[in-house]
């Protein structure tokens, strides 16, 4: 029987992740270094994402597209570029900026969007996540190295129920932190980095703390050195 459920599941099953132009990806830069290495080197996932989670990713993408549409209608903005590709050639790094906005004042802002539930916003406690600061900052570094004007970098969270934004300026020092992480990634290159130490990753109850608890390579990583 035809159904919306089966039709949507069919589309989600055809997911085709956008391949990165470089080994290291902006979307993964602020997370676990070893997980990033596994992804970059095509190591098979031992705990692949549940299909339902790809629906969550799809919602996030749709949110981003809608936010761009709304911002493009703002009278405070003179121009807006979406999904702007950036690269740092000598560091084998690439990514895509959610939006690059030029305000009527001439100021240029790099925007990284994140959608979240009300519970997730409450859990953040009024502070941006460090991995999101690193990601956004890496894009700012890439643009500036390419000789492009960027006056500020921002991470903007949007509530999924109301579109209410929560906006944060990314301090300049996060750009240097992003570069340090990239230097570490390139130091290891094709050599597997060390995993998160047992005493740090363990939750003390026979399981693992975040990010290990949600890792797509949990068995691969925790069962090896």
Image (cartoon, helix red, strand yellow):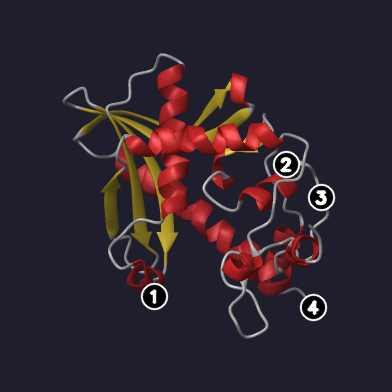
Mark closer to the chain start, 1 or 4: 4
On the rendered structure, is 22 left or right of 149?
right
> In this rendering, is residue 134 above or below 149?
below
Quadrant occupied by the C terminus: bottom right
Q: Which mark is residue 1?
A: 4
Q: Which residue is mark 2?
A: 40
Mark closer to the chain start, 4 or 3: 4
Instruction: Report, in whole angstroms, how far the alpha carbon at label 4 lies from the one at label 3.
Output: 38 Å
| Rendered residue at 52%/60% (across/down) | 59
Instruction: Report, in whole angstroms, how far the alpha carbon at label 1 lies from the one at label 4.
Output: 37 Å
On the rendered structure, is 154 left or right of 106?
right
| Rendered residue at 41%/30% (across/down) | 140
Residue 119, percent from left and from top: 39, 75
Mark closer to the chain start, 4 or 2: 4
Q: Which residue is mark 3?
A: 43
Q: Secondary structure at mark 2?
A: helix
Q: Secondary structure at mark 3?
A: loop
Residue 124, percent from left and from top: 36, 66
Q: Which mark is residue 201?
A: none
In the image, farthest residue toward the left: 105
Instruction: Report, in whole angstroms, how far the alpha carbon at label 2 lies from the one at label 1.
Output: 31 Å
Mark closer to the chain start, 1 or 3: 3
Which corner quadrant of the image does residue 41 belong to? top right
Assess whether mark 2 and mark 4 are in contact (beta carbons under 8 angstroms).
no
| Rendered residue at 32%/25% (across/down) | 150
Assess whether mark 4 and mark 1 are in contact (beta carbons under 8 angstroms).
no
Q: Mark 1, mark 4: which one is toward the viewer?
A: 1
Q: Mark 2, mark 1: which one is toward the viewer?
A: 2
Q: Which mark is residue 119?
A: 1
Residue 20, percent from left and from top: 67, 35
Disc 3 residue crowd, few under 14, some 14–19, many 20+, Cα 10 Å: few
Quadrant occupied by the N terminus: bottom right
């Amino acid at each position: 029987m035809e159904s919306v459920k089966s039709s949507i599941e069919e589309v989600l099953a055809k997911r085709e992740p956008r391949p990165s132009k470089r080994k290291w990806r902006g979307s993964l830069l602020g997370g676990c270094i070893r997980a990033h290495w596994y992804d970059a080197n095509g190591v098979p996932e031992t705990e692949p994402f549940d299909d339902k989670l790809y629906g969550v990713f799809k919602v996030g993408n749709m949110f981003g597209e809608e936010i761009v549409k709304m911002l493009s209608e703002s009278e405070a903005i003179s121009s807006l570029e979406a999904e702007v590709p950036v690269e740092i050639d000598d560091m084998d790094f690439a990514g895509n900026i959610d939006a690059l906005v030029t305000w009527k004042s001439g100021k240029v802002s790099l925007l990284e969007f994140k959608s979240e539930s009300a519970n997730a916003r409450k859990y953040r406690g009024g502070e941006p996540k460090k991995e999101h600061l690193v990601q956004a900052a890496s894009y700012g570094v890439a643009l500036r190295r390419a000789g492009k004007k960027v006056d500020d970098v921002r991470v903007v969270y949007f509530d999924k129920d109301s579109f209410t934004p929560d906006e944060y300026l990314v301090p300049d020092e996060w750009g240097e932190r992003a570069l340090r992480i990239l230097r570490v990634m390139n130091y290891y290159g094709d050599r597997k980095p060390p995993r998160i130490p047992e005493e740090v990753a363990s939750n003390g109850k026979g399981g693992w703390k975040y990010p290990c608890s949600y890792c797509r390579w949990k068995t691969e990583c925790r069962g090896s050195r």
